[in-house]
Structure formats: structure tokens, C-alpha cells
Amino acid sequence: MKDNKGAGLRHFLNKESTAGVVFSLPFIIGFLLFMVVPMGISFYYSLCDYNILSPPVFAGLKNYIKMFTDDKVFFQTIGVTFYFALVSVPLRLIFALLVAMLLFNTTKATGFYRAAYYLPSIIGGSVAVAILWKRMFATDGVVNHLLGIMGIQTSFAWLGNKNTAIWTLIILAVWQFGSSMLIFLSSLKQIPVTLYEAARVDGANKFSQFFKITLPLLTPTIFFNLVMQMINGFLAFTQCFIITQGKPMNSTLFYTVYMYQQSFEFYNTGYGAALAWVMLGIIGIITTVLFATKKFWVYTEGV
């Protein structure tokens, strides 16, 4: 009997499915402990009056009702976040594609340029870069100094004007196009050269080749970048928190920063948790819409 049990145990341990489960356990345990459990706790807090300093008190849908009926800043932050994401993401993808096409032809310096263009994506979200960006657009910063060199004497407060403050954050976001650029570059290399050769034989110019061959075949990559960058756009935090703090007059107050303020500055942690779940719903709806419209503009081979 013992031999049979030992043989059965060895057989079970030697199965590929068992090995897969064993090697997946660290991720599964980490996912449960650091994702699922915190999300469950967060959802419970969103239904409570909770200020961190005292135990949560169940309040039902009070936080959600307050959000949609008695919080003007909530709607303002949604507008600011949508504006930021819907402007910065397309601009970032356009610049990424343009640079990818410029770097498509390999030369001795191509590797250096690829690394140089990718570097902002690595450091762009750091606190140090945000502080540097804030100093650049100060009244005595580099931007006004460069304008002075060009003969335009100004001490314009870029971060203090409602019309320009949000654009300083958009420009910083667009500057971080390196990751999308590398993905575009990889996809460009997968397009068969024979298609361009056939197009040239038929008399197609560069303009026609781009819109008839390159762009359609890149639509799956554009879709991937669009989804990922749109999610990142709605979750942007560091730029606003360090550079503008939502000023002036909440014109640059991102949703995530408002959520942070409610949770940890105003001690309305339950309300902050409710804000987080609403943002999850907004991102889910936007992602669903993107996937629903995918069939109308994304080229799928063989379909």
C-alpha cells in the first residue's frame, strides 16, 4: 500500500499541471494578498464613514450619493482628467509613430537615438523630473528665459494661468512617448518589405504607401498603445501632485490627486475609496468602448 501511495505521489508531482501550479503559486498568492484582498477591503471602506483614525462605520451608499449629488469638485476633476487624457494620449501616439518611422532605417547612431528617445519614459514619471519641470515653467524659469533670448521679454506665470497650466502637464506627458515608440518600431519591422516593393511597382508614392500599407497594418499596435496609454492617462498622478497641486482653481486637479486628498489630507478615507471604485468603473467603460469599436478600424489579417 505504501509503495502504491508513493508511486501515486511521485506521479502527481511529476505531472506538468502540478509543476505549473507550483510555479504559479507565488504569483497567485501575491495576487490574492496584494490585489484581491485590498480591493475587497477598499470596497467595504467605500460603503463606510471612515477617517483612518477611528473604526469604519457602515453607511451604505452614502459616499456614492454624496459624490454624484453634492460634490462639484468631483465633476470638475473628471472634466480635467478627461481633457488631459483625450489630448495627451493621441499627441503622444502621433509623436511616437513619427519618431519610430524616423528611426526605422538602421544606422550606426540608431541605437543611441532609440535609447535617448526612450529615456524620458523611464525618468519622466519621477519626482525629480516633475520638480525640474515645475522650475522650467516658473516665472523665472528656463522657458521664459529662452523666450527672452528670442526677444520676447516675459515673466508669464505658466503654472498660474488656467489656460496654460494644464498644457504644461500635457507636454510633459507627450514627452514620455518612448515606450510607445519602441512598440511602433517593432511593429514596423514586421511589415513585409514585399508590400512596399509591389506598391512602388504600381506607382504608389510614400504618402500612399503610408496610408494604404503602413497605417492599416499598424492598427493592432495603435489599438494596444491606445488602450494602455488611455488607462495610464486616467491614472496620472505625479505630474499634478508635484507640479501644480491642482492649482489654479482646480483647473489641473486630476482625479487621482483629488482621491488622494480626500483619503489622506482631508481624512475622508471612505469617500476616497468610493472615488477609486468610480474611477475603476470609468476605466472599465472606456476600455469596453474601445474594444467594441475595434472591429470598425483595426485591421485583422484574414478577416
Image (cartoon, helix red, strand yellow):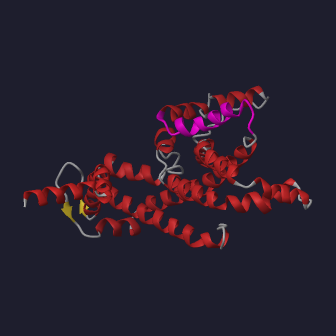
233 in the magenta segment:
no
* Residue located 31% across and 65% down the image: 63
Q: Magenta region: which residues? A: 106-127
The answer to whether 12 appears left or right of 255 in the picture is left
Q: Nearer the viewer, residue 72 or 201?
A: 201
Q: Position of residue 162 (x, y in %)?
A: 59, 48
Left or right of 253, for residue 111: right
Q: Residue at x 48, y 51 (%)?
A: 254
Horizontal arrangement in the rendering, residue 139 relative to residue 201 (left or right): left
Q: How many marks?
A: 0
Q: Position of residue 221 (x, y in %)?
A: 62, 57
- Work out whether 174 lies above or below 275: above
Q: Position of residue 60 (x, y in %)?
A: 25, 70
Residue under the image location 55 percent in, 53 percent down? 229
User: Which sits in the foreground, 85 or 63?
Assistant: 85
Quadrant of the frame with the C terminus: bottom right
Residue 220 visible (yes or no): yes
